[in-house]
Image: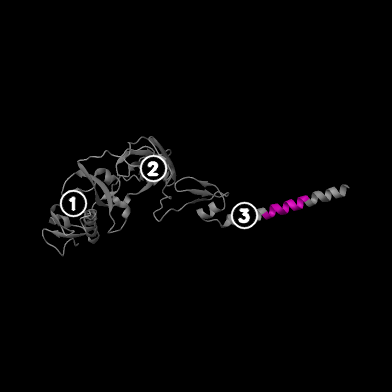
Amino acid sequence: MYTKIILGIGIVIVVTLGILFIYLDNSEAPLATINSFAGCASAGYPVMESYPRQCRTPDGRTYTEILSDNDKSNLIRLTNPQPNDTTESPITIKGEARGTWYFEASFPVIIVDGNGKVLVQAPIQAKSDWMTQDFVPFETTIQFDTPTTETGELVLKKDNPSGLPEYDDEIRIPVKFKTWEAPAKNEDATTVKAYFTRDESGESCDKVFSVTRVIPKTQAVAKATLEELIKGPSAQEKTSGFGSAIPTGSKLNSISIVNGEARVDFNATAESGGGSCSMGLRKKQITETLMQFPTVKSVKLSVEGRMGDIFQP
């Protein structure tokens, strides 16, 4: 009887050890092959809801989700808010950034609505020593003005005391606003679009972006819209990354629309300076701004009455 009990216990121990060996063997093999966020997440390991997301394996390795070719997760990571979160004022912003993202322990944060209106611009402070190459946590709670659209962007800009554009950097997070107010309609005004360049276009020489302009109601709406374009982006729009390839001092001499063709004449300044890319963007800004009107089917440009070899580097 005693022998049977001992034998039974022995069998149970052997079976248990066998099962444990098989489990460990099967669980350690995939762990050793994990080398990406996707592999870590698909294996069922914990995913941290940061921006971008991170996954941690049991042996302490961390993998960050790669979002695009412009991914900056090795420089700055946002924990709150997440992309397309619904936000309201005041908003708490927190995450971590490399020490090189800061200057004097802070960097600028900007919130803009869909019309490019800057709702707030303020510094965000490091929560520990920023004089390091490692990640440093940040957190702030700020209030912002009432937006005029339902959606907008949270912009976290690298502090750049030099002012040199080659050292600029930022991430933009789309957000939704819980409370917003559409601007009041003015019966004596007309809403039009002006097309500008923007930082996010990279090296593109023909990509332009529209901003909304409200101008006094007029029969010469195309002329008034071009004059808005020549003025360039507002200070708020510049903060949001908008720019213009059209030189300061450019002037519209005349515009007429004949059989669907907009004939536009500028002063000589409008084609001064810049290379081929700049010239292409100038023409694109003017053309897209005019083509929004249903009466315009094509655009012909001239400079001081001269056509043909114009807007050339």
Q: Which residue is mark 2?
A: 176
Q: Position of residue 267 (x, y in %)?
A: 12, 55
Which residue does the image show at 68% across and 55% down from the upper left? 22
Q: Position of residue 12 (x, y in %)?
A: 77, 50
Q: Is residue 90 above or below residue 267?
A: above
Q: Which residue is mark 1?
A: 222
**Magenta-highlighted residues:** 12-22
Q: Secondary structure at mark 1?
A: helix
Q: State the residue in front, 90 or 160.
A: 90
Q: Is residue 185 left or right of residue 59?
A: left
Q: Main secondary structure of the magenta part?
A: helix
Give the residue type at disc 1.
Answer: Ala
**Residue 28: assigned label:** 3
Q: Position of residue 127 (x, y in %)?
A: 42, 38
Which residue does the image show at 19% across and 49% down from the upper left? 225
Give the residue type at disc 3.
Answer: Glu
> Quick check: is 227 in the magenta stretch?
no
- Quarter holding residue 214: top left
Crowdedness near tag 2: few (<14), some (14–19) or many (≥20) residues, C-alpha within 10 Å: many
Q: Is residue 1 left or right of residue 205?
A: right
Q: Residue furthest bottom?
A: 308
